[in-house]
Image: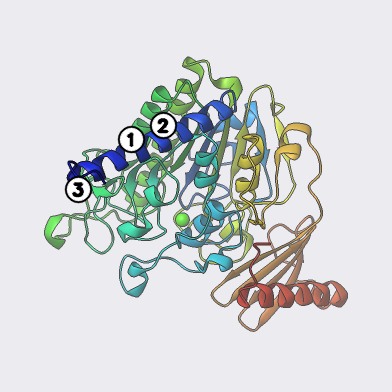
Amino acid sequence: MADNMDRREFVKLVAAGAAVLIGNRRAEARSRAAGKPNIILIMADDLGYGDIGCYGSTKIRTPNIDALAKGGMKFTDYHSNCPVCSPTRAALLTGRYQQRSGIEGVVYAKGPTRQTGLALGETTFAEVLKSYGYATALFGKWHLGYNVAFNPAMQGFDEFRGYVSGNVDFHSHIDGAGFDDWWKNLEKVPEEGYTTDLITKHGVDFIERHKDEPFCLYLPHEAPHSPYQGRNDPPERLPGGKKGRKAKGQEIARAYKEMVEVMDAGIGRIVETVKRLGLEHRTFIFFCSDNGATKNGSNGILAGHKGTLWEGGHRVPAVACWPGRIRPGTITDQTVLGMDLFATMVSLAGAKLPTGLKLDGVDLLGMLTENRDLPERTLFWRYRKERAVRRGPWKLLVRGNNTMLFNLDEDPGEKNDLARANPQMLKMLEDELAAWEQEVSAGVELRA
Ligand SMILES: [Ca+2]
């Protein structure tokens, strides 16, 4: 340090130099990513297999999601990694079974899990895309840690507006434990409005600001998760722990329908923005749910609901749209998991995985754009005392002491247990499950 320069000036100079270096690196990455497709990943919360028009709902109208399906690909066998929120999101963000990051259950607003979250050492798709020059944002629900140390801004998202808990009051934005939960990056910054509308507003604004560079926009919606509130319903959770009026009976069905339809209209505004800016042919849009519906929604022909490993707990709607790349009106019955999206997004961005990072999910790009078959694989779910294994049409389902086997091609409603009729298949899937459980519980690192 020069004698005539005080310490503060010196620190300022070093900081300015570092900022220039970081800025240069970002600019370099941005120029490398120029011309790469944009990514918009939209996820509903607790939306069931029978809850939208293109999946057979006659009660709820979803013309905008239906139009994405018509213009692209509809999945009949897409699954969330878990039948509840946080583990599904851990798998989606990391591209690996959530057992590897230790997020096997809901990160609750109350109790000891409030202090936990997705470890910063985990690599998220946002971090990979950001390092490759993508502008990244998350508007909506995080649910992978309450503490600011676990904030999305620490996990690769340039911008975050939304909530970190499992759900907030759609109007007051108070979480289930009574805390205000509306953030702008690392700070709580309140914002007036209906959660679904705010998510759409920030999404539209982000696309407009980033129309000239590749972006990855993640929009995890709150709809149709409880509390059941439409745009004009009163808040249920009030400041100071006071309780407002809560929807009951028929009001729940009415609010549920409105919640899905307002989300659908918001998706319409996102698509309209993409089209208006001329980005339609270079924007990949993926829509899915994070787990099956509760008893207040519909899982169509499927058995069970959120929180169970019956198909209704995790087989959910999913739609991909990318004009010019995905053939319109395609319906696929290939088995896909939420954790596959990481590898897919990295692939379509032309990016590379960080050295040594190995994903459980597979790249869907060839399947999406050329209708190629995915490699044969065995897939696993584990939640509380339930286990499920899929190989082709076969599903092993373990619920406590009850072990069942179904052929989902013939019996998607899981009514006809074939465990006794097909002991070889049962044994094979049980053995694969035991090997997988040993691998993930032994904490065998996938990093090479
Ligand atoms: Ca959920």
> Which residue is outermost to the front?
3
Closer to the camera in the image, 67 or 42: 42
Cβ of mark 2 under 8 Å from ligand 1: the answer is no
Q: For residue 129, which quarter of the picture?
A: top right
Q: Is residue 106 left or right of residue 110?
A: right
Give the tally of numbered discs: 3
Q: Quadrant of the C terminus?
A: bottom right
**Kind of residue sitting beneath label 2:** Gly
Q: For residue 97, which quarter of the picture?
A: bottom right
Label 2, label 1: how many angstroms apart (C-alpha)?
7 Å
Which colour style is shown?
A: rainbow
In the rendered image, which residue does mark 2 sit on?
266
Query: Where is residue 123 shown, x and y percent of the image?
Result: 53, 54
**Kind of residue sitting beneath label 1:** Asp
In this rendering, does residue 85 appear at all?
A: yes
In the rendered image, which residue does mark 1 sit on?
197
Label 2, label 3: how many angstroms apart (C-alpha)?
52 Å
Q: Could you say whether the residue bearing mark 2 is in a helix, strand or loop?
A: helix
Cβ of mark 1 under 8 Å from ligand 1: the answer is no
